[in-house]
Amino acid sequence: MTTPAGGRSAEQRTRLYFGSAVVPKVDTKNGEVTMGFAFYALGGFHRLYSRLLLRAACNRLLANRRKGAA
């Protein structure tokens, strides 16, 4: 999700929000709360993918900043 971040009128800024919502499963037999198999199975992929997305966003911001400075 993004929203305008304000700032000086000559600058256009955007605030980026990111995150995940994960809700535990409740075992109906014994009431035990667990994150489930998929949570643990996809954890490594999620960490890698998140880092790649953040790196790409950072690189794009730096490239835009360099274009503006030139």
Image: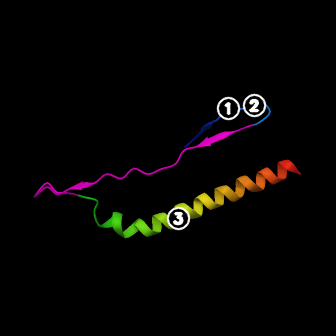
Badge 2 local density, few (<14 within 10 Å), some, or many (20+)? few
Q: In which quarter of the image is residue 38?
A: bottom left
The disc placed on residue 6 is 1
Q: Name the residue type under label 3.
A: Tyr
* Residue that protrudes farthest toward the right in the picture: 70
Tell which residue pokes out farthest to the left in this image: 29
Q: Which mark is residue 32?
A: none
Residues at marks 2 and 1 touching, judged by CB atoms closer than 8 Å: no
Range covered by the magenta-colored residues: 12-33
Q: Position of residue 4 (x, y in %)?
A: 64, 35
Helix, strand or loop at label 3? It is helix
**The quadrant where residue 39 appears:** bottom left
The residue positioned 59% from the left and 58% from the top of the image is: 54
Q: Where is residue 70 in the image (x, y as percent from the top left)?
A: 89, 51
What residue do we see at 58% from left, 64% from top?
Answer: 52
User: In the structure shown, which secondary structural element does the residue marked by tag 1 occupy?
Assistant: loop
- The Cα–Cα distance between marks 2 and 1, rounded to whole angstroms, is 7 Å
Q: Please, what is the three-letter code of the amino acid marked with disc 2?
A: Arg
Residue that numbered label 3 is attached to: 49
